[in-house]
Image (cartoon, helix red, strand yellow):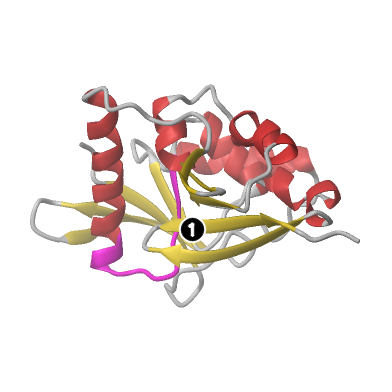
Amino acid sequence: MNKKIAVTCDKDNQLTDFASLSHIIIFENNGTAWKIRKRFPFNFSSIKTAQEIRDYTRNLILKLDDCKIIASRSINGLIYNVFDRMRFAIFEIDSLDDNMLDKIITDIYNSLHDVNNNVPVATAPVETTGGIYYLDLIKLQNAHPDISSKKALRAFIDNSPFIRLDLVCSHIPAWLKSPEYEKKLDITTRNSGSSLLVSISKKCLD
């Protein structure tokens, strides 16, 4: 497996998001340690329109050569969508060190191992205990790229009387942040390595 990871960094070589991006560092594992393979400046500071964001993201992807893993403190919206369509493995992380880079590769390996060994991957939330449901969106979308988060979750959230829905994902799906859902859902998050654990419950409406 190709062990190259592109990371968004600021001018001080610290992990950052795309809003504060100064340059990209591509790390490569040579079998014994992580080394910097490539570093180049890149930022979105002057970009305004949706089309410009798409074009700049595609231009960035060309500069990544054969690296197909992107890691950032935060990646969502149009930038996420472009990377997703180009079949990148996308990770939101809260720290940058060798252990985190190892964790990303392990997560990808485990996902591929499950898919290749025909381990069933749930395509909708599964009840783990009374009223508590769980779905690993990262595994789902690795195994079934055609199933979007909205396709997997919207009908369940709209129609099922759940107490709590726990998700493993790389970011909160943008559609869950819309006014339609913000007024009826409570959403909490916490980081778990390179993944995000999201808990969703329904608000008590008067």
Q: Which residues are magenta?
A: 89-100
Of 81 and 129, the residue lying toward us: 129
Q: Return the residue at label 1.
A: 197
- The answer to which image quadrant residue 112 occupies is top left
Q: Quadrant of the N terminus?
A: top left
The magenta stretch spans residue 90: yes
Q: Residue furthest bottom?
A: 12
Is residue 178 shown above or below 15? above
Of 205 and 185, the residue lying toward us: 205
Rendering coords of residue 97 (x, y %): 29, 69
- The answer to which image quadrant residue 40 occupies is bottom left
Rendering coords of residue 118 (x, y %): 26, 22
User: For the residue labelled by badge 1, is the local secondary structure a helix, a strand or a loop?
Assistant: strand
Rendering coords of residue 175 (x, y %): 73, 43
Rendering coords of residue 169 (x, y %): 49, 48
Q: Is residue 119 visible?
A: yes
Q: Quadrant of the C terminus?
A: bottom right
Which residue sits at x=44%, y=62%? 93
- Residue type at mark 1 is Leu
The magenta stretch spans residue 16: no
Left or right of 206, for residue 194: left
Left or right of 90, for residue 98: left
Which residue sits at x=14%, y=61%? 33
Q: Residues within 10 Å of mark 1 (few under 14, many from 20)?
A: some
Q: Is residue 42 visible?
A: no
